[in-house]
Image (cartoon, rainbow, N blue to C red):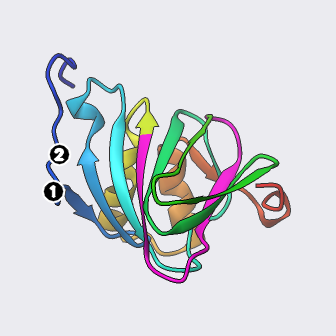
Amino acid sequence: MKTFTSAAVSPAGHGTPAMAFGEHAIRIRAAETGGAFGVFEGIIPPGEGPPAHVHEREDEFIRVIAGRFGFWCADDYVELAEGGCIAMPRGVPHRFRNIGETQGRLMAVSSPGGFEDFFATAERCQAETPEQIAAIAAGFGVRFLPDDERQAA
């Protein structure tokens, strides 16, 4: 991994596509920032979003680029529209859902970086079953919560 001594740039409309669990574009990889952070965008259809999960390795910052989203982080719930931001600490259960009626778009920054490669890895491995997905997620320090623990997050 190179040292982060120069700008990491991702022009508008660029990024490496990753199609696991919806449409994603990897904008800046951890390898480009000396591991400091990674950046990706996700296009989220109405009513969609990930199940409650915990990142053990990284803090996560999300900015709503388009649409309206509900975010659950521990016992907190907030709704954000275009331009809204949320930062969620590692180790805390969270999830989000597109609560709008149109396709939404999010930009996520994970620090330290590395999680941005989860989607490409899942796509490459053709993960389909919950067990396969959980195994790949575990390799990225992410765990999905069992149904009985998902209520709070």
**Residue 82 at what x, y percent from top left?**
47, 60
Q: Is residue 15 visible?
A: yes
Q: Are marks 2 and 1 in contact (CB under 8 Å)?
A: yes
Is 45 above or below relative to 16?
A: below
Residue extent of the magenta highlight: 90-109
Is 126 above or below relative to 102?
A: above
Q: Quadrant of residue 49?
A: bottom right
> Is residue 34 covered in magenta?
no
Amino acid carrying label 1: it is His
Is 147 above or below relative to 95?
A: below
Q: CA distance from mark 2 to mark 1?
A: 6 Å
Instruction: Please tell me which residue lies in front, 93 or 146.
Output: 93
Instruction: Please tell me which residue lies in front, 140 or 98.
Output: 98
Residue at 52% x, 34% y: name it.
58
> Is residue 96 covered in magenta?
yes
SS at mark 1? Answer: loop
Q: Quadrant of residue 141?
A: top right
Q: Is residue 61 left or right of residue 28?
A: right
Q: Where does label 1 land, which residue?
A: 14
Amino acid carrying label 2: it is Ser
Q: Residues within 10 Å of mark 1 (few under 14, many from 20)?
A: few
Q: Is residue 39 left or right of residue 8?
A: right
SS at mark 2? Answer: loop
Residue at 34% x, 39% y: name it.
38
Is 127 above or below relative to 7?
A: below
Which quadrant holds the C terminus? bottom right
